[in-house]
Amino acid sequence: MKIPVGILGATGMVGQNYIGLLNEHPWFEVRFVAASPRSAGKKYKEAVAGRWQLAESCADAVSGLTVHDANDVSAALAAHDRGQCAFVFSALETGKDQIRALEESYAKAGVPVVSNASAHRSTPDVPMLIAEVNPHHADVIPFQQRNHGFKKGFIAVKPNCSIQSYMTPFYALINTGFEIRRAIVSTMQAASGAGYPGVASLDLIDNIVPFINGEEEKSELEPLKILGTVENGVIKPADAPIIAAHCNRVSVSDGHTACVSIEFGAKKPSIAEIKHIWTNFTALPQELNLPFAPMHPIIIQEEDDRPQPRKDRDADKAMAVTVGRIRPCPVFDVRFVGLSHNTVRGAAGGGILNAELLKAKGFLD
Amino acid sequence: MKIPVGILGATGMVGQNYIGLLNEHPWFEVRFVAASPRSAGKKYKEAVAGRWQLAESCADAVSGLTVHDANDVSAALAAHDRGQCAFVFSALETGKDQIRALEESYAKAGVPVVSNASAHRSTPDVPMLIAEVNPHHADVIPFQQRNHGFKKGFIAVKPNCSIQSYMTPFYALINTGFEIRRAIVSTMQAASGAGYPGVASLDLIDNIVPFINGEEEKSELEPLKILGTVENGVIKPADAPIIAAHCNRVSVSDGHTACVSIEFGAKKPSIAEIKHIWTNFTALPQELNLPFAPMHPIIIQEEDDRPQPRKDRDADKAMAVTVGRIRPCPVFDVRFVGLSHNTVRGAAGGGILNAELLKAKGFLD
Amino acid sequence: MKIPVGILGATGMVGQNYIGLLNEHPWFEVRFVAASPRSAGKKYKEAVAGRWQLAESCADAVSGLTVHDANDVSAALAAHDRGQCAFVFSALETGKDQIRALEESYAKAGVPVVSNASAHRSTPDVPMLIAEVNPHHADVIPFQQRNHGFKKGFIAVKPNCSIQSYMTPFYALINTGFEIRRAIVSTMQAASGAGYPGVASLDLIDNIVPFINGEEEKSELEPLKILGTVENGVIKPADAPIIAAHCNRVSVSDGHTACVSIEFGAKKPSIAEIKHIWTNFTALPQELNLPFAPMHPIIIQEEDDRPQPRKDRDADKAMAVTVGRIRPCPVFDVRFVGLSHNTVRGAAGGGILNAELLKAKGFLD
Amino acid sequence: MKIPVGILGATGMVGQNYIGLLNEHPWFEVRFVAASPRSAGKKYKEAVAGRWQLAESCADAVSGLTVHDANDVSAALAAHDRGQCAFVFSALETGKDQIRALEESYAKAGVPVVSNASAHRSTPDVPMLIAEVNPHHADVIPFQQRNHGFKKGFIAVKPNCSIQSYMTPFYALINTGFEIRRAIVSTMQAASGAGYPGVASLDLIDNIVPFINGEEEKSELEPLKILGTVENGVIKPADAPIIAAHCNRVSVSDGHTACVSIEFGAKKPSIAEIKHIWTNFTALPQELNLPFAPMHPIIIQEEDDRPQPRKDRDADKAMAVTVGRIRPCPVFDVRFVGLSHNTVRGAAGGGILNAELLKAKGFLD
């Protein structure tokens, strides 16, 4: 008996990715889909006709589901009460204020929300989880429930896809005792990060765009919350590392690459130590053997010219971060290139892993 | 009466660019071409059949020239003596040691060499010129001639294409009194930088390659020589800025983009001052009104998402650097994006401007 | 004293191309711009902020024009009466029915319309002009005026960009006496053909899309009208060639390529004859020395692997068709590859050439 | 106990694909690898260092194999006699004459050759197999052995990758009784078809190349041999369909697309009949349940804009042909778009399926 789940924003690109990745998931089963009023009432298959982006066709079980209006919380609640929607994945893509309010409405109605949206990322009592990095931030959920008067519902979010290529490597070093004071990061991000239709092809043919609206701020600030401490029921952001991000859009379908220079605190690991730490890094998802957990969260590629998006993005079910070119930095201490799959690890796959973690921790019972 | 010039390595991609750009040059006229023994004896048109990379056809005057063996200095010397080759542009693409020796042979034979090759970039008495930045480095030429027993010949080189997007902007600030201590640079470089055939299409379709052999070292060290001082007939490299470069190859035909974070010394310009300095920067080439000098060596694009290779590489005859996104850096002081055309400003066009400068300074009389 | 012209749909991609191409036009000068109500009232520069697609900045004279509502014919009429809008180029991009009615309103108000839109392409008394092919179709204009009660206004259109790569070559052969019975054409069309934002980058990264809505029908039928005869004040389409078109979208910014197999009637030219006909083809625009007329409407590239979009699209001010690989066809008689610049020759540039033709013929006095 | 196999040309791109695809093959196991003298003597892992093109790392069992000189047949023979090389897959990429002779040497030595190379495609007693189309052509093998004095050795080849997208669909119709008289085919072929490094990235960035050396001839002639009859121990090519091919290289990594117009004989199927025939088509490989046989050799995509390389190339283990846009042709009878994965179905995967077929038929015992 699998746990029935719902998808809010099911017809968008992230929503489609959830549906694709949850096909044959050992724990979860999509039984409820909701999207904009425009899609409401249609069969899912009709609602995505001409917009389906995945190579694999949509599973029959989902194709036949009726799409509900995501703004109508009562539909999800009814499904919840019928045992067809234990919780929802939020892949909503409308305005931030609207999403913030809507996710709260679901939580208030008793339907937990595992979200990919950015609306609640800076809310202090909402955990922003990378399952290998800050699973203990889930501890704020009971406080969140109390603060808002949620009974069984709650909101948990995941961070922006752009930070995934360096966040877990940073954490693995920090967790071993090597403070990272500062970092300068330059990303080359895939078109799929902007959804569909997203970036115009005229912007990426023989071209790059050295700007992604709001992305640098997220890339600089979200790591501080993720590395923060839980105090009095809220997450207090860390003070370091101070990050400067340069975010670029390049002609790649999937896979965000980051060139990173880092400055350690007084205690500085050798290149060999760094490689050892990253190669051997595992965390709670691996220990719990969660279905979407990569066996090795960080994979080191020793060839000079790796990682590369087309060759490395799919490593370990597209859930691992691949790191290469680990070498001394003439300005800071060490530099490297990190890569992760933005629509799997950085979006729907990361959300599913978060849900697995929350289930394992008892929040989705 | 134009000055007759020769091209060494005339059949390669940089050589072709020289020929294309020198078409209708007001001062220079290609009258001598040399390449590998394989091409020697053929008409230039035949030698490049199936390898011609430019959109425009080769000018008739050059098409009919007989290609000489670049290893045979006597051919150039004979042309020199006949008044058909006042000096040569070196676009040689063979091994570094071989090029180093060969360029010296031409200089020794009395044929000045204005080179695009990297072989002599670190030779202390060979000037590595960016015409707007260090034209005074040409002062080492008489010492070079004395050291090597060159009579009228000499060697002058230009730096690597990768530094062009930030070197002139750096210099404009330094020259105004703002020391730059450190910089972290991440480049996204065009395929044409690797020549033809160069990078395999399989490496750049839906992909980037985060490595270019030897490029990061050049991007870090060459600026120090360019900013160096002439002492006792040699160029003494500067101590700063210390640069860390991350060099990437992306799916762009022409135009290298650099994301740059800089740390100033004690005296720090405001963003407004930086813009003012860059907008108003001109130097000797502009003063001398050299044919290939851009009217504005640095162009600021105020739109959020510029500069972009396809839109900005051709600015001011493809000889200007376009800069945008000038904004504070949370880690260092300021960050920006720079872009320049790698095969024009960064290669053949830069070489031609250097020759114009050397002519204006009386070294090519 | 230049002729003042207006642009309807001035803020869209085709509209921008008109403005870019008309900069420094010897006859015409943009003095009036109109677009959707959303842009109305703004300065043109503001209306296109963040949407400007050309490498060159917008000319100052146009930047400062106030954008009018294109639906409000009275604005153009007032400009017309003030001597600031002798006629309009229509680059409207809204619905076909709406454009049809609107272009008629302008014509009725006395403002001639030289259109890029498809709305009136099948209207029998509206000429669909390729200046080198069917300039005599302008003869229907007086009939059109009489039929609709237009006084000085009228509508003339240009055909779809997809046919430009083979239509002029077809005509040159037909005009020499070689009937073309049938042709099978496969196009590889540039992204810019769909406007901006147009095709999503995810559709063209490591991909092609073998479908463009409505394009095959246009590619098959429009040639028949262009080759038609003027009878009783309307254009009667030709019966041949019967064309089958396969239209594909590929990862190219500008330049449509067509692979073409043709079957002649009883009289069949040799390959040599075809090359001779195409090389020597000129027509009325060349005879009249119109500013936008290419010197050679058809350019033959003899190299095996040409024409190629990046190398050949800009030939002769981007107004020529480049043809290559002319060889026997095992199924039909002859096959070849044709290429033309879709946003210049195939859109705004073709429209300007039509206006020049109509001016030379006295229709715009 | 798996059958031990060898790979000739194991370090090239097709060779690497064989090794990748044979990893965990249920019947075959790579135990012998040979390549050029330059690689001979090295461990396979070292020989492909810096040249490995697959996303997945090379299997350990193969990494450790010593590479033999492919020109030295005795090495393979020794392995054959030791029970480590029952037969070889030929992925040789040197000159055609050299490959022809070398493959014969292996056959003569008693080592069967299942080849991807083009050298023996037109040899009348060498079967050119598409497992679903002409498995009975294997009947010429005993004649080939007798003609050349081969004892157990023989040569079987597969056709060029470019025909795979239309050959099986053609056969399915012909086999049902619908003669195809003529066809005009325009292909858009992936970069991987040219091997690695293959096509220069400068040729495919913002560009297409409308020419592939020798490809059109193969695309036109090979189908006739495949559809031929076995008479007197040799394959007599069919007379029809007469095919005209236009072959283009486009910016796609994997997956060849073909736009096809076909003319039937007197008996013409309806669109509905064609769809029915293709949807239900299966052949001997499906009947024998061969490991690499796709469940459905031809998959129909009903969406307007499919098949697309990135979305459809991997269908059914990348061994199926995906067909779409089946519609009437105004010039011939019917037109459609076909797509197949050129390095899997069109190269190594097709070779493996051929070996499976030959094994099932008893030729590899």
Image (tube, coloured by chain):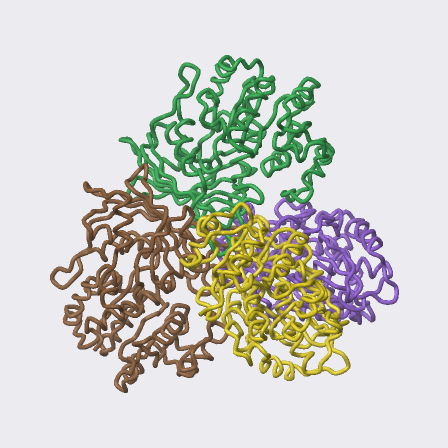
Chain colours: A brown, B green, C purple, D yellow
| Pick the front one: C32 or D306 | D306
- Residue beneath the point at 25% across and 65% down: A285
Q: Position of residue B122 (x, y in %)?
A: 44, 26
* View extreme (bottom): residue: A82
Q: Position of residue C362 (x, y in %)?
A: 77, 55
Q: Position of residue D117 (x, y in %)?
A: 62, 59
Rendered view: B74 above or below A345: above
| Pick the front one: C133 or B88 | B88
Residue C89 is at least partly visible in this image: no
| Pick the front one: B70 or C157 | B70
Q: Quadrant of residue D107?
A: bottom right
Total marks shown come to 0
Q: Is residue D68 left or right of residue B61?
A: left
Rendered view: C327 above or below B198: below
Q: Position of residue A359 (x, y in %)?
A: 23, 73
Rendered view: B97 above or below B197: above
Rendered view: D49 above or below C205: above
Q: Is residue C357 left or right of residue B324?
A: right
* View extreme (left): residue: A232
Q: Quadrant of residue B219?
A: top left
Screen quadrant of the N terminus of chain A: bottom left
Q: Quadrant of residue B27?
A: top right
Q: Is residue B6 left or right of residue B132?
A: right
- Residue beneath the point at 49% across and 47% down: D41
Residue A302 is at least partly visible in this image: yes
Screen quadrant of the C terminus of chain A: bottom left
| Pick the front one: A157 or A18 | A18
